[in-house]
Image: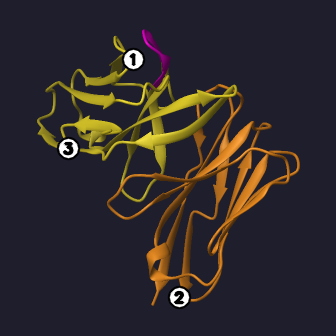
Chain colours: A orange, B yellow
Amino acid sequence: GQQVMQIPQYQHVQEGEDFTTYCNSSTTLSNIQWYKQRPGGHPVFLIQLVKSGEVKKQKRLTFQFGEAKKNSSLHITATQTTDVGTYFCAGSQGAQKLVFGQGTRLTINP
Amino acid sequence: NAGVTQTPKFRVLKTGQSMTLLCAQDMNHEYMYWYRQDPGMGLRLIHYSVGEGTTAKGEVPDGYNVSRLKKQNFLLGLESAAPSQTSVYFCASSFRDRGMNTEAFFGQGTRLTVV
């Protein structure tokens, strides 16, 4: 079945450093979504990418969808303590169920 | 508009007891999911539903049953709780747009402890 792998599992950075998490699917996806889960909270939707090679930005966050629609990345520029949490990607093929990656837990040293 | 509501928020069970977790969504979403999340871990799919009256197994279905008799509700049952089922349970729902499964909305979670 469809699998979505996410790396790294953990990342610790100094405040102000950049951060990137990568998502790879075993199959071509219709769309890729990114979620953020704050410690003790629930996952919250950040963004969805649909088009091959698509790039979207939200302030310091940059999201990319690969040309083959099998991989994606989330890059945070100049991390802040408010960026702490676990970032999940999720993909689906057409109308099939969403499949989540294992998540990347980001911790930040102020 | 409440979104996705889970009840209860906390529960302590004794080994062998049964319970039902309720998930309700008021967004008319077709898809509903139950996940478990162990400390420091990702989301593992237990069961899901693509519409009223239909359910399917996820990656960790053993020890759980589900029902979706109404489109807005998705129930997760534990028939005989085990300590290994101690976890945080999240319900989520999503909708279909232009043939794609789109944004998932999560409930606040149910923290279950089995002693």
Q: List x then y, in percent, for residue B96.
A: 59, 27
Is residue B15 found left or right of A72 in the rendered image? Answer: left
Return the residue at label 1.
B71
Judging depth in this view, the residue of A28 and B106 nearest the camera is B106
Residue B38, numbered circle: none
Q: Are marks 3 and 1 on the same chain?
A: yes
Q: Chain of mark 1?
A: B
Q: Which residues are magenta?
A: B48-55
At a point 73% along the width and 50% down the height, the residue shown is: A24
User: Is residue B28 on the magenta stretch?
Assistant: no
Is residue B82 found left or right of B1 in the rendered image? Answer: left
Q: Counting other residues with Cα less than 10 Å from the Cα at mark 1, is it few (<14), some (14-19), or many (20 or more)?
A: many
For marks 3 and 1 on the same chain, the one whose residue lies earlier in the sequence? 3
Is residue B15 found left or right of A27 in the rendered image? Answer: left
Q: Amino acid at mark 2?
A: Glu
Where, quadrant-wise, is the N terminus of chain A in this rendering? top right
Q: Residue furthest front?
A: B1
Badge 3 vs badge 1, beta-carbon distance below 8 Å: no
Residue A15, numbered circle: 2
Q: Residue A59: which quarter of the image?
A: bottom right
Q: Chain of mark 2?
A: A
Q: Amino acid at mark 3?
A: Lys
Q: Counting other residues with Cα less than 10 Å from the Cα at mark 3, is it few (<14), some (14-19), or many (20 or more)?
A: some
Residue B9, numbered circle: 3
Question: SS for tag 1?
Answer: loop
